[in-house]
C-alpha cells in the first residue's frame, strides 16, 4: 500500500499544472451538481470555492448567493459566514446583534464552527473589539474541536501576536531607553539647576553680606558724624550759655552802675563801669 | 598802615579759621585843641609835648580809635585796637594793641601779641579820653615811659580777696619807640620784664608796678647813641568817695650804666649818660556835681643832674644833653561836662613852671635859647566820645 501511495505521489509530482486545475474544476462541478440538488453542505462548499477562486473564477457575489442558500437550510457554518460578512461589510445592526449573541452562546456551548467564527471576529475586530488573545482562545478551542481552518487561523494570529509583542517590546525598550535618557537628562538638568541655584545663592549671600558690611560701615560713619555733630552742638550750647551768662552779668553790672551813678550822665571814675569798660582788658 | 593790614590779616585769619562768631566793634574819638603862650628869646617856638605851640593846634589830642574783639573759640578772643592819631602823620593808623587772649581758667588769662603793659593807673585805657577826667593824663608822670606797648606775653591773674579785687600782671617782651620831644631819636627796649599788682574795691584802687628793660637809643640826626638799662616803678591810687574823685601817682625812673657816643669813627665823643634819673608825681582832686566834674591837678617832674656828663665836650655842637637837673611844676584846672552818656566836653587851663630849661625832661622839643616867660599857660579844649 505504501508503495502504491509512494508511486502515486511520485507520479503526481510529474503531473502538469493543468492537471491540478482539471481536478479542481472537476471537484467544483461535482459540488455544484450536489448544490443544485439542494445539499446545504455542497452549497456552502461551492460558495467557498467562488470566494477563494479554487476550481472556479473568484466571484464574491456568487459566493454570497450560495452561502445564503446554505444558510436558508440552517447550515450553521453558512449562517456564521454570512453573519461575519454582513457585519464586516455593513457594520452592526439589531439583527446582527441578535445573531452575534447567538454565536456567543453557541461558542460557549462548544460549537466548533461558532468558536471558529467568534475567534475570527476577535482576530479581525468584526462585531467585537479586536482582541488577539480572545481570538487565539476561541480559535484554539475550535482547532481542538476539529476545525482545521481554525488551526491555520490560530497560527496566523499567534504570528501576529508575536509580531505585536515584539514590536511592543521594541517600543517599550525604546520608550524605556528614552525614559532612562530623559531621566538622566532631567537628573543632569536638576544637578545643573541645583549648582546654578547654589552659585546664585552664594552670590546673593555674598552680595547681601557686602551690602550688610557697607551698610554697617555707613551706619558707623553716620553715627560718628552724628556724634561729632552732637558734641559740636553741646559745645555750641555751652558757649551760648556761657555767652548768655556773661551777657547777663554784663547787663547786671551796667544796671548796677546806672543805679549807683548820681545821674545818668556823670563821670564814672571806675573804668570798669559804664560804656568805657569795653575798652579795658582787665575788666571782668 | 602796613602794620594795620598785617595785624588785621593775622587777626582775621585766626578768627575766620574758626568761623568767627561774635565780633564786637567799639570805637572812641577825641577832638581837641591846645595852645600855649610860651616862646623862646630868639623867636623860636616852644614845642611842648609833641605838637602844642603858641598857635592853636588840633594835632596834640585829636585821635580816633577802633577796637575789634572777636571770639575765636570758646576760651579764646582776638583783640585789636587801631589808633589814628592826629599827631602821628595826620591820622595815619597804627595798632595800639593786638593780642590773642586765652582764658586758661576763671581767674587766669594769657595774652600773646602786642600788649599794653600795666605801668600806670590808666595805662590800659590811655587813649580812651572818655574814661578819665583830664584831656590828657599828667605829662609829668606819664612822659617817663616812652614805650606805650610791647610785643610779648602777659599773664593776667584776678581774684577776690574779701570785698577787694586783686590783680597780678607779669609780662615780658620788647619794643621800639620814638622819644617824645626828640623825633630823630629811636628808642629800643629789649628784655622788657615787668609786673603790676592791683587792689581795688568800690571806693579805692591801689596799684604798684615796676619794670626793667635794656634800653638803647640811636639818634639818626646827630649820631648820638647810648645804651643802658632802665627801671621804672610807679605807685598809684585813685578814689571815688561821696562824689570826691581823686587820682595820684608817683613814678621814679632809674637809668643804669647809660653810656654813649656822639659822632662816628675818630671824631666820636664818648659820654657817660644821655638820660637822667627822673621822678614824677601828680595828684588830682575833683568833685562830681551831676554832669560836671571840676578838678585840679598838681604835678611835678624832677630830673636828677648827671654828674658824669661833661658839657664842655659838646661845646658848640648844639646837641641836647641834660647836664643839669631840671624840674617842672604844673597846676591844671579842669572841667569835665557830660554831654550825654557817651560824650564829654573837657576844658583845661594849665600853668607850668620850668626851673631850668638847660635840662631836658622829655616834655619839650630841644630849646635853642632861653624862654621869654618864666611860666607857661596852656589852654586845652576837647570832646571825647565813645561808641
Image (spheres, coloured by chain):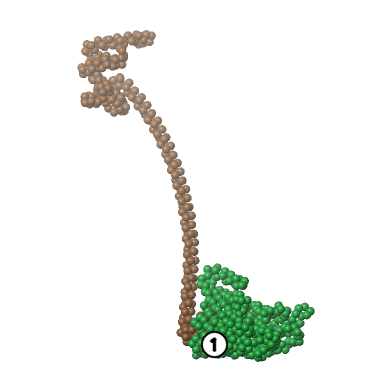
Tag 1 residue = B335
Q: Residues within 10 Å of mark 1 (few under 14, many from 20)?
A: many
Position above or below: A229 against A279: above
Judged left or right of residue B356, residue A69 is: left
Judged left or right of residue A125, residue B125 is: right
Chain B's shade in the image?
A: green
Q: Residue furthest left?
A: A73
Q: Quadrant of residue A156?
A: top left
Please give the chain letter of the residue carrying mark 1.
Answer: B
Judged left or right of residue B141, residue B314 is: right
Quadrant where the N terminus of chain B sits is bottom right
Q: Quadrant of residue A185?
A: top left
Residue B143 visible in the picture: no
Q: Residue at x 56, y 88 (%)?
A: B334
Q: Quadrant of residue A60?
A: top left
Q: Residue at x 30, y 28 (%)?
A: A131
Q: Residue at x 46, y 54 (%)?
A: A208
B94 or A224: which is nearer to us? B94
Q: Position of residue B192 (x, y in %)?
A: 64, 80
Q: Position of residue A28 (x, y in %)?
A: 28, 11
The secondary structure type at the circle numbered 1 is strand
Amino acid at each position: 500500500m505504501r508503495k502504491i501511495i509512494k508511486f502515486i505521489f511520485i507520479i503526481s509530482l510529474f503531473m502538469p499544472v493543468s492537471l491540478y486545475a482539471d481536478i479542481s474544476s472537476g471537484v467544483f462541478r461535482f459540488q455544484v451538481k450536489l448544490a443544485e440538488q439542494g445539499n446545504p453542505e455542497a452549497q456552502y462548499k461551492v460558495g467557498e470555492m467562488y470566494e477563494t477562486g479554487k476550481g472556479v473564477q473568484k466571484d464574491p457575489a456568487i459566493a454570497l448567493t450560495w452561502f445564503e442558500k446554505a444558510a436558508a437550510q440552517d447550515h450553521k457554518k453558512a449562517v456564521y459566514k454570512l453573519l461575519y460578512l454582513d457585519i464586516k461589510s455593513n457594520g452592526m445592526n439589531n439583527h446582527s446583534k441578535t445573531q452575534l449573541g447567538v454565536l456567543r452562546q453557541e461558542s460557549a456551548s462548544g460549537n466548533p464552527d461558532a468558536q471558529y467564527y467568534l475567534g475570527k471576529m476577535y482576530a479581525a475586530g468584526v462585531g467585537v473589539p479586536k482582541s488577539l488573545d480572545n481570538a487565539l482562545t476561541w480559535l484554539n478551542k475550535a482547532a481542538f474541536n476539529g476545525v482545521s481552518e481554525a488551526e491555520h487561523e490560530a497560527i496566523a494570529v499567534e504570528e501576529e501576536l508575536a509580531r505585536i509583542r515584539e514590536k511592543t517590546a521594541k517600543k517599550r525598550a525604546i520608550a524605556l531607553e528614552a525614559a532612562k535618557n530623559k531621566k538622566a537628562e532631567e537628573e543632569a538638568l536638576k544637578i545643573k539647576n541645583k549648582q546654578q541655584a547654589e552659585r546664585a545663592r552664594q552670590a546673593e549671600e555674598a552680595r547681601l553680606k557686602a551690602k550688610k558690611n557697607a551698610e554697617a560701615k555707613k551706619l558707623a560713619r553716620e553715627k560718628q558724624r552724628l556724634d561729632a555733630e552732637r558734641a559740636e552742638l553741646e559745645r555750641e550750647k555751652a558757649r551760648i550759655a556761657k555767652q548768655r551768662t556773661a551777657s547777663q552779668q554784663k547787663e547786671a553790672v551796667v544796671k548796677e552802675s546806672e543805679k549807683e551813678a548820681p545821674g545818668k550822665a556823670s563821670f564814672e571814675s571806675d573804668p570798669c563801669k559804664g560804656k568805657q569798660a569795653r575798652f579795658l582788658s582787665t575788666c571782668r | 598802615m602796613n602794620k594795620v593790614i598785617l595785624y588785621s590779616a593775622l587777626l582775621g585769619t585766626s578768627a575766620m579759621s574758626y568761623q568767627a562768631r561774635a565780633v564786637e566793634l567799639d570805637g572812641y574819638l577825641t577832638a581837641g585843641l591846645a595852645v600855649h603862650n610860651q616862646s623862646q628869646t630868639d623867636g623860636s617856638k616852644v614845642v611842648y609835648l609833641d605838637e602844642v605851640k603858641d598857635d592853636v593846634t588840633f594835632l596834640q589830642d585829636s585821635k580816633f580809635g577802633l577796637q575789634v574783639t572777636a571770639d575765636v573759640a570758646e576760651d579764646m578772643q582776638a583783640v585789636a585796637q587801631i589808633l589814628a592819631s592826629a599827631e602821628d602823620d595826620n591820622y595815619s593808623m597804627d595798632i595800639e594793641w593786638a593780642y590773642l587772649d586765652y582764658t586758661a581758667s576763671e581767674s587766669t588769662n594769657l595774652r600773646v601779641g602786642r600788649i599794653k603793659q600795666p605801668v600806670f593807673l590808666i595805662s590800659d585805657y590811655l587813649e580812651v579820653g572818655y574814661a578819665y577826667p583830664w584831656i590828657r593824663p599828667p605829662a609829668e608822670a606819664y612822659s617817663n615811659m616812652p614805650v606805650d606797648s610791647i610785643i610779648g606775653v602777659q599773664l593776667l591773674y584776678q581774684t577776690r580777696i574779701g570785698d577787694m579785687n586783686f590783680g597780678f600782671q607779669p609780662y615780658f617782651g620788647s619794643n621800639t619807640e620814638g622819644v617824645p620831644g626828640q623825633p630823630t631819636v629811636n628808642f629800643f627796649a629789649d628784655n622788657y620784664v615787668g609786673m603790676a599788682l592791683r587792689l581795688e574795691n568800690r571806693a579805692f584802687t591801689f596799684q604798684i608796678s615796676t619794670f626793667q628793660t635794656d634800653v638803647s637809643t640811636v639818634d639818626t640826626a646827630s649820631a648820638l647813641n647810648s645804651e643802658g638799662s632802665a627801671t621804672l616803678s610807679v605807685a598809684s591810687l585813685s578814689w571815688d568817695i561821696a562824689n570826691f574823685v581823686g587820682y595820684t601817682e608817683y613814678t621814679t625812673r632809674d637809668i643804669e650804666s647809660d653810656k654813649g657816643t656822639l659822632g662816628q669813627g675818630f671824631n666820636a665823643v664818648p659820654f657817660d649818660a644821655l638820660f637822667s634819673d627822673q621822678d614824677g608825681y601828680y595828684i588830682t582832686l575833683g568833685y562830681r556835681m551831676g554832669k560836671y566834674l571840676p578838678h585840679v591837678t598838681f604835678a611835678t617832674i624832677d630830673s636828677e643832674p648827671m654828674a658824669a656828663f661833661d658839657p664842655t665836650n659838646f661845646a658848640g655842637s648844639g646837641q641836647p644833653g641834660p647836664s643839669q637837673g631840671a624840674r617842672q611844676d604844673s597846676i591844671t584846672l579842669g572841667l569835665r561836662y557830660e554831654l550825654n552818656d557817651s560824650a564829654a566836653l573837657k576844658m583845661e587851663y594849665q600853668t607850668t613852671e620850668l626851673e631850668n630849661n638847660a635840662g631836658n625832661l622829655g616834655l619839650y622839643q630841644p630849646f635853642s635859647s632861653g624862654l621869654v616867660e618864666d611860666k607857661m599857660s596852656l589852654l586845652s579844649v576837647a570832646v571825647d566820645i565813645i561808641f
